[in-house]
Image (cartoon, rainbow, N blue to C red):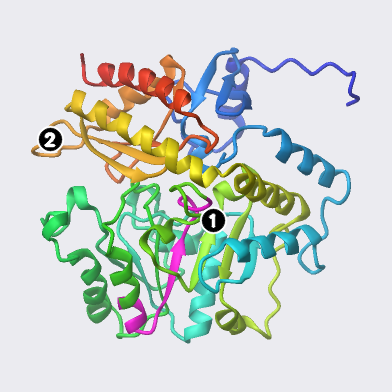
Amino acid sequence: MSPTTPKAKAKSRKDIVAKHKEFLLPSLGSHYADPLPFVSGKGVHLTDADGKEYLDFFGGIVTVSVGHCDEEITERIVDQLRTLQHTSTLFPIEAQADLAEKLAAIAPGDLKRSFFTNSGSEADEKAIQMAQAHTGRRQVVALRHCYSGGTAGAMSLTAHGTWRINEPNAFPVTHAANAYCYRCPFGKEPTSCNLECAKDIETAIQTTTDGQIAAFIAEPIQGVGGFITPPPEYFKEAAAIARKYGGLFIADEVQSGFGRTGTKWFGIEQWGVVPDIMTGAKGIANGLPMGWMITTDAVSQALNGKVYLNTFGGNPISATAALATVEAMEKRDLPGNAARVGAHFRNRLEELRDKYPLIGDVRGKGLMQALELVKDRKTKEPAKPELQKVIESAREQGLVIGKGGLMGNVIRMTPPMTVSVSDVDEAIGKLDKALAVGSGA
């Protein structure tokens, strides 16, 4: 298409939805009762096929980190498209090498050696394979309510019934209790819990393994689980227990990474812990497919002698997008913006909690915030139907928000990290009206 060729008119919403239903798997569910196709986006806004504009406070499931169709990132992608589109990892790729150098510079501790994939699922699987090869063991400890992806290995790690199919067993996995303070599995309060959730990792190792593990893998903030956020000392204790029994600690930063939690580049840094292996995806490339694993020099040697490749992993286009995204975050101080605007966002959400008994808990860090909805604050009975009413009403108000949690009663909000205080205030106004509908007010 030449620069003067007029852009084709977008199909109608009805036509897009009809074709989607006819030719795609029926298991691909819709966020809304009436499916909503978006046809364009800019910054923190999306536009649907009918021309209606929305504030995007879900960011393509924690993926659009620097805003939709960012000019700087787009130009660099287009330049790469016109220069070299593909070779494969059998040949050194300049953009991939530059990206790996940048990621080694911002990663915590002595994490240095990268491997690129197409998704977070693949990255998590490669991390487990790396840990198994390094330790010579196979058993893995993960956490209940965690989500690691849709491939067989990642699904084995996942402890969220909604996302498991036919009991996959690609890895021998045992699941310990998670740090779900709002619904503590031990009936404790955060101020006097003695970190029973972390200690359960040791109990799980002692009772469900042979006493030696390959790895403990955890999301710093559980994403699909409903942005479950552990107490301050949790990961220091958890990582120490894993290492006591010979395991490596893998931080799954697919959702919490790349400045999302505020100030720090990676969520695990909020807990003052350096992992042995770290994975990422989603926000790394602002929407292009990219997964990533990084580890130390020492651990990386475990797979020497074996040829590993990934046909599309770290390809010139995705690697260029990721490098442009990270450099844009750095130049614009988006981790800092996530902290500053995120603090304002959290305050406004807590105001809504004071107003609506429907909100049982507010949690998260930076621009990764959640509301858990309950029918009654004393019983904490999940308010799943009410949540869907809020989601649908927010749509009518022109606000896109996410949902999650094992019981389907958590609102998840992760706007692009370019979001402003005024954007947050506008979103809060829309969410306020939606919560009134969900509350039956």
- Is residue 363 highlighted in magenta? no
242, 236: nearer the viewer: 236
Q: Position of residue 385 (x, y in %)?
A: 26, 28
Task: Return the residue nearer the eye: 150 or 129.
Answer: 129
User: What is the tally of numbered marks visible in this picture?
Assistant: 2
Q: Residue 4, relative to residue 154: is it above or below? A: above
Residue holding disc 2: 377
Asked whether 75 or 85 is in front, the reply is: 75
Q: Quadrant of the N terminus?
A: top right
Callout 1: SS: helix
Whether 247 is among the magenta residues is yes
Inter-mark Cα distance, 1 to 2:
35 Å
Above or below: residue 282 compared with residue 414: below
Quadrant where the C terminus is found in the figure: top left
Q: Residue at x 59, y 17 (%)?
A: 13
Instruction: Identify the mark at residue 120; answer none if there is no mark.
Output: 1
Residue 82 horizontal side relative to residue 128, left or right: right
Magenta-colored span: 241-258
In the displayed structure, 54 sits above or below 243; it is above
Type of amino acid at the residue the image marks with label 1: Gly
Residue 50 appears left or right of 197 = right
The quarter of the picture where residue 241 lies is: bottom left
Instruction: Give the farthest residue toward the left.
Output: 378
Q: Residue at x 35, y 22 (%)?
A: 431
Using the rendered image of the protein, determine whether residue 33 is visible from the camera's viewpoint. Answer: no
First in residue order: circle 1 vs circle 2? 1
Relative to 190, say whether 75 is above or below: above
Amino acid at pointer 2: Arg
